[in-house]
Image (cartoon, helix red, strand yellow):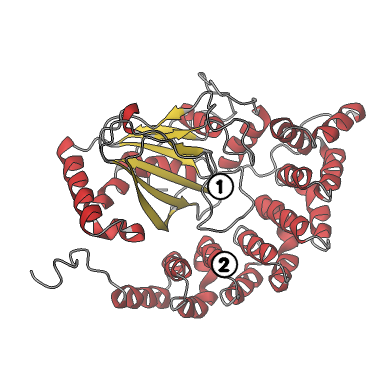
């Protein structure tokens, strides 16, 4: 991996990101750069409105932000080399004295089982000085792995603010709870939000790694429960070690019974129980498989997280669960198999067959999982190629993203990706183009170039400046 010039995260920063779910970092552009950027934003927003997904081409200097060594180094550290920028991007304008509501961002309008492992991340960039009074983004540390909120809107113990000088940005786990805070100054506050996805599964640490074993960050002040085992597993996963917890803890029957009961407890307790069961060998896996098939949605979901890190012992039971009548349980089993990657190679035929499943949830989870497989790739590519014609836009989008993860091994999908360049959905089109780029064969590159030339967008052309100069 070429890391020259990038400012990769340190072990301490990565440990903090794993536990807290975010880092506040800063670029070193001169003040004039940001003054000019804000002037352009003011002009565009006043005269044209929010440019939405065209934010980057409309304000060309903004690309320099995402080429900055602090930004590229942080994203490479968390998402690995060759990460992808999502086609959705948005400039948030906040002049309201009222706080926004706590939320997790959707996946461009669709739902999915959220990863504990960092597959997606966001950068929230502040191009102007953003003191607390100007309403920076508020982040609830450590909540990236919680489906539910453990606090009320008006009670935010431990809330962190992305406050600082122009050039400050928050690198966040995509699934963390966050909100806009009150802008009591009433002056324009911009936050430029860009999303990024991993295209390579970790084989080795992609940050400035000096230590092998997980250690809790030296300074950690979280308003939540500690999740040492989950954090350790994430560190190992990011280091290329899949299923690292398997069989690492004793399976004492009375304790296993207690852990199994705790799967139905509050979310922080249930998460810790699921990870400890994942470390408890075949007996722990058995409890998690029973939990997966529970009628209680929360128990089933947290059991899937445990199974996703439980190693090879979980694979036969997960493959069997693909036949379950409940599509949500099937989707959770698919999710766990995808996270197990190469350990779940035997599941590829069954996953491919699920692309004919009547439930959209199952199909889009299956294409995501197929993009993480490390064996039987010809079968996976053929299935994903067919999914590019699925009736559901999310399935088509996730199929194109999955093919980009397979890179040159997905060459056989190029004809279908060429057709997807004409899809009615903007994100399917955009990420079909991205997939052609990651495949990188001569035909893929020529198809991509033709598409980009035919759809090129002029950043200078506006209503007030249609043609000249």
Disc 1 to disc 2, C-alpha distance: 23 Å
Q: On the image, numbered disc 2 is attached to which residue? A: 399
- Depth order, front residue of 258/205: 258
Secondary structure of residue under mark 1:
loop
Q: Residue at x 83, y 63 (%)?
A: 325
Q: Earlier in the sequence, mark 1 or mark 2?
A: 1
Q: Residue at x 21, y 46 (%)?
A: 37
- Depth order, front residue of 134/238: 134
Task: Judge whether 220 appears above or below 397 on screen.
Answer: above
Instruction: Rate crowding at label 2 as few (under 14), some (14 to 19) or many (20 or more) other CA atoms within 10 Å.
Output: many
Q: Residue lying farthest front?
A: 97
Q: Residue at x 75, y 39 (%)?
A: 246
Secondary structure of residue under mark 2:
helix
- Left or right: residue 307 compared with residue 106: right
Figure quadrant of residue 359: bottom right
Residue 207 rendering spot, x and y as whole percentages: 45, 38
């Amino acid at each position: 991996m070429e890391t020259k010039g990038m400012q990769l995260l340190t072990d301490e920063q990565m440990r903090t990101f794993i536990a807290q779910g975010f880092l506040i970092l800063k670029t070193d552009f001169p003040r004039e750069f940001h003054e000019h950027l804000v002037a352009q934003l003011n002009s565009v927003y006043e005269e044209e409105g929010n440019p939405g997904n065209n934010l980057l081409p409309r304000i060309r200097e903004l690309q320099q932000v995402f080429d900055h060594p602090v930004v590229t180094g942080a994203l490479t550290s968390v998402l690995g080399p060759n990460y992808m920028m999502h086609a959705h991007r948005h400039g948030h304008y906040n002049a309201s004295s009222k706080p926004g509501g706590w939320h997790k961002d959707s996946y461009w309008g669709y739902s999915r089982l959220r990863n504990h492992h960092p597959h997606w991340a966001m950068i929230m960039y502040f191009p102007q000085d953003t003191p607390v009074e100007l309403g920076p983004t508020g982040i609830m540390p450590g909540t990236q792995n919680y489906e539910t909120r453990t606090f009320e809107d008006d009670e935010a113990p431990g809330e962190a603010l992305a406050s600082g000088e122009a050039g400050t940005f928050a690198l966040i786990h995509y699934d963390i709870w966050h909100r806009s805070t009150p802008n009591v100054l009433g002056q324009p506050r911009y936050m430029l939000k860009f999303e990024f996805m991993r295209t390579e599964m970790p084989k080795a640490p992609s940050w400035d790694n000096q230590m092998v074993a997980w250690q809790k960050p030296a300074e950690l002040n979280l308003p939540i429960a500690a999740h040492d085992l989950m954090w350790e597993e994430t560190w190992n996963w990011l280091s290329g070690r899949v299923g690292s917890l398997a069989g690492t803890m004793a399976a004492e029957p009375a304790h296993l019974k207690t852990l199994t009961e705790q799967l139905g407890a509050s979310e922080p307790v249930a998460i810790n129980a699921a990870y400890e069961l994942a470390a408890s060998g075949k007996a722990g896996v058995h409890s998690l498989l029973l939990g997966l098939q529970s009628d209680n949605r929360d128990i089933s979901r947290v059991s899937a997280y445990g199974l996703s890190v439980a190693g090879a012992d979980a694979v036969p039971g997960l493959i069997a669960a693909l036949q379950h009548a409940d599509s949500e349980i099937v989707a959770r089993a698919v999710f766990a198999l995808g996270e197990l990657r190469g350990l779940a190679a035997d599941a590829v035929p069954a996953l491919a067959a699920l692309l004919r499943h009547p439930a959209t949830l199952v199909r889009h989870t299956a294409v995501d999982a197929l993009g993480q497989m490390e064996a039987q790739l010809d079968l996976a590519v053929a299935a994903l190629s067919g999914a590019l014609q699925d009736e559901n836009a999310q399935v088509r989008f996730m199929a194109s993203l999955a093919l980009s993860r397979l890179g040159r091994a997905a060459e056989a999908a190029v004809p279908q990706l060429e057709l997807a360049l004409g899809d009615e959905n903007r994100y399917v089109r955009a990420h079909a183009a991205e997939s052609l780029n990651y495949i990188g064969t001569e035909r893929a590159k020529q198809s991509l170039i033709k598409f980009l030339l035919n759809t090129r967008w002029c950043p200078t052309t506006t209503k007030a400046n249609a043609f000249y100069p």
